[in-house]
Image (cartoon, rainbow, N blue to C red):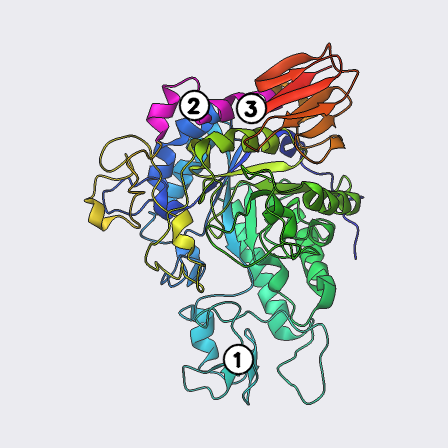
Amino acid sequence: MADRTARRPRPAWLDRAVLYQIYPQSFADSDGDGIGDLRGIASRLDHLERLGIDAVWINPCFASPFHDAGYDVSDHFSIAPRYGTDEDLAHLVEEAGRRGIRVLLDLVAGHTSDQHPWFKKAVQDPEDDRYIWSDRPVRGFVPSPGPREGHYLPNFFDHQPALNFGYAHPRPGQPWRRPVDAPGPEANRRALLEVMDHWLGKGVAGFRVDMAHSLVKDDPGHRRTAEVWTGLRARLEADHPEAVLFAEWGDPATSVPAGFDADFLLHFGGPTRGGALRSLWDNRAGTDLGPWDFSGSACYFGAEGGGSAATFLRAWRAATAAVGDAGHIALPTSNHDFSRLACGPRGPEQLRAAFAFLLTWPALPAVYYGDEIGMRYVPGLPDKEGSSTGARRNRAGSRTPMQWDSTPGAGFSTAPEDRFYLPLDPAPERPDAASQWADEGSLLNLVRRLTALRKAHPGLGTGGTAEVAYDGYPLVYERDGCYLVAVNPRREPAALALPGYGSSRPLLVEGAECTRSGIEVEGFGFGIFQR
């Protein structure tokens, strides 16, 4: 695998950055149709600036039939009318830039909608190899919807045909397994560069790449897929050396050396099959993918205190050893596919310790919209634009409208609520941003203070070391040799004998104290100290 560290240092701004994910349908509606849009996002940038956000990643905003909430792209070069126009995106990028906020778009690299002109052409032309076709039935393939005979390979849903980037192991007698240097795969690599060049030319800072691991098929270890990305990155840098690429891969040890600036720990993927992230947050009360740890352990951030940070830490150490200084590992609060922090029995009082950990750990922190005010995963919603992928796997619960204020429509839209993209959280005590900005002790203001502390003290940022003193309760770690952090996400108090820190200066503390003999933390408490 190519080593990119010798030719491109990681962007310095990422070392202190805090990322914010926006699900555009649900963030802010500017035109009263019940669906969020780009102008709506621009109207709420003051919230992000005040919070200390450095970059926003917007889920796909391209033309689409929306059978998978925009991840079924029908035109990579057009903004979906529901979100606005090119001019609206330009306005957003300009207004964000004035506040020091970069804008990243979501690049769906491995597939398109079956309504994309490329696929419409492919179903008419038996010689077209932009997608993966077989003349005979093959497991996992879908019958052709047009005059072309045969079957095509989807990437996720049937309406998302996989773009052809080749197979790692072509086989005689299986002509659909084209090599990675065949004409179709080469055309798709050129197309990806054209798409990225188009939007980078309009001022966006880069992309989060959906299913970045999915390009080359039958690719154990994703070696050939990594080579594709290394080549794409090298060609991209000629015209856009400052562009950033974040991967939805879940395996930073593979993706970052391949050319990505960061990769997200995810609820799936990688050597632990998502166990690293899920061992922290997943209480199996929301979008449930089944056990993450077959020993039956609870997640670490649970009130009962039945978990351990060891699963996360083992995966973290392995990934950081492989990544080195080439890039970052992104740690999200949640995302559009996975349960929010506030889910099931995990209440708002437990989120404070979670954010204290997220914003002092040497990861690139990613806040999913609404998590900063404690929005909850809403169970029992209907399927919306492909949100449901199986029993107990309805992603709609993490995609409800942002709660801006306490008015009936929560400040999200002026449309009647029955026209909202998804229903509002019906809970009478639902949190909102306006109320929390007015309350100095709120979760939102705590997150603001934590982001400010992270920026004021580089040793608490994304770079630097983290030496763990204890991985039970409380979780205790030292940052860059001069900061001590203790986090206790359980209900009961916790203490650790740790001499030598009695004179440490508290920087931000809730229910924690350094004594001459150790550190004591109340239930759901945390402490950040400087030696």
- Amino acid found under the numbered disc labelled 1: Phe
Q: Give the Cα distance between marks 1 and 3.
A: 49 Å
User: Residue at (70%, 28%) from the top-left corner?
Assistant: 476
In depth, the one of 34 and 1 nearer the eye is: 34
Q: Give the labeled residue for mark 3.
A: 450
Q: Which residues are magenta?
A: 432-454
- On residue 350, the disc is none
Instruction: Please tell me which residue is depicted at 38% across the width and 60% down the height of the picture.
Output: 64
Residue at numbered disc 1? 141
**Residue 19 in sight from this viewpoint:** yes
Secondary element at tag 1: loop
Using the rendered image of the protein, determine whether residue 525 is visible from the camera's viewpoint.
no
Please give the label number shown on residue 442.
2
Q: Earlier in the sequence, mark 2 or mark 3?
A: 2
Where's residue 252, x and y in %?
69, 49
Q: Earlier in the sequence, mark 1 or mark 2?
A: 1
| SS of the residue under disc 2 | loop
